[in-house]
Image (cartoon, grey):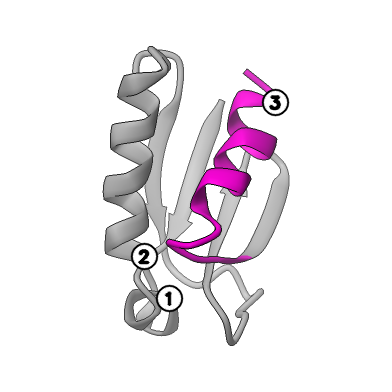
Amino acid sequence: MIIQICIGSACHLKGSHELVELLRTALKENNLDHEVALAGSFCMGKCNPNGVTVQVDDTIVTGVTREGFRDFFNEYILGKA
């Protein structure tokens, strides 16, 4: 599984760095850190006013926030791992 987090200007301001840390921690806690490639990406062209854009394999998820991280992780990472 490949997870790309937008680190472009808009997503950076919306907390992409924090999402990277949340993902690293959650992957480690779920023993997925060796099965998932985590990468940064510049603008994916799917900006959302509420949160960060994240691509999981071929699926683009927009508007990911710290508050919604757990739901995102459960659906898009654990649900596909």
Tell me which label, 1 or 2, sits earlier in the chain: 1
Task: Answer left or right for 27 relative to 51.
Answer: left
N-terminal label among 1 and 3:
1
Q: Residues within 10 Å of mark 2 (few under 14, many from 20)?
A: many
> Residue at 38% of width from left, 32% of height from top?
26
Q: Identify whether 30 is placed above or below 16.
A: above
Local secondary structure at mark 3: loop
Q: Is residue 77 magenta?
A: yes
Spatial separation of the CA atoms under disc 1 and disc 3? 24 Å
Mark 1 and mark 2 residues within 8 Å of each other at the beta carbon: yes
Indicate which disc residue 34 carries. none
Q: Nearer the viewer, mark 3 or mark 2?
A: 3
SS at mark 1? helix
Tell me where the magenta segment starts and ends, as one range: 63-81
Q: Are marks 3 and 2 in contact (CB under 8 Å)?
A: no
Residue at numbered disc 3: 79
Amino acid bearing label 1: Cys
Check disc 3: other Cα within 10 Å, few if <14, some if 14-19, many if 20+. few
Q: Which residue is mark 1?
A: 11
